[in-house]
């Protein structure tokens, strides 16, 4: 196992996940469902969903890697992140003043 690659992957995903919609949704679900499920239950359900989504990403990456060059995949991923960032910025400016459901 390549420790340098593992550290790079961990750091990239950890930083990308901090404050993203998944984390905010988990926070809000914990707030709103605290009378129906424990914090451990929320953690286990959210963690299971993330593990499954990551597994799907790894499987898709394996398939795409057979047909596309790594440089093309990097450029495509970068373009997708830029597009998603622009969409989120647009939503943020449009929804200013609205409050999250758990506040």
Image: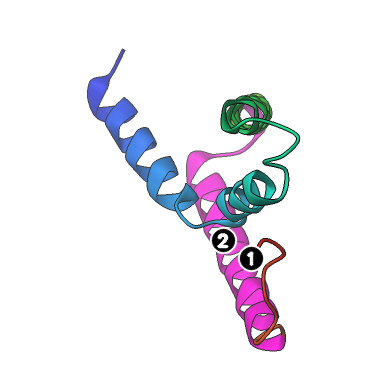
Residue pointed to by mark 1: 84
Q: Residue 86, located in which quarter of the rendered image?
A: bottom right
- Compared to residue 81, the image places residue 67 above or below, namely above
Across and down, in percent, residue 79 comes to: 58, 63
**Residue assigned mark 2:** 81
Which residue is most to the front? 35
Find the residue positioned furthest to the left: 4
Callout 2 secondary element: helix
Q: Is 64 placed above or below 26 here?
A: above
Q: Could you say which is closer to the camera, residue 33 or residue 100? A: 33
Can residue 83 be spotted in the picture?
A: yes
Residue at 25% across, 21% down: 3
Quadrant (top left, top right, bottom left, bottom right) of the N terminus? top left
Badge 1 element: helix
Residue at point 36% right, 34% down? 10
Q: Residue at x 28, y 31 (%)?
A: 7
Query: Along the line of sight, which residue is nearer the eye, 23 or 62?
Result: 23
Residue situated furthest right in the rendering: 36
**The C terminus - image quarter:** bottom right
Q: What stretch is highlighted in magenta?
A: 66-94
Q: Do the residues labelled 2 and 1 touch (CB within 8 Å)?
A: yes
């Amino acid at each position: 196992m390549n420790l340098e690659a593992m550290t790079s992957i961990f750091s990239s995903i950890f930083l990308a996940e901090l404050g993203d919609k998944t984390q905010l949704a988990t926070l809000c679900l914990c707030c709103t469902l605290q009378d129906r499920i424990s914090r451990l239950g929320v953690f286990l359900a959210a963690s299971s969903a993330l593990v499954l989504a990551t597994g799907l990403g790894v499987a898709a990456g394996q398939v795409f890697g057979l047909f596309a060059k790594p440089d093309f995949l990097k450029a495509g991923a970068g373009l997708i992140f830029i597009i998603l960032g622009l969409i989120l910025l647009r939503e943020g400016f449009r929804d200013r003043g609205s409050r999250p459901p758990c506040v």
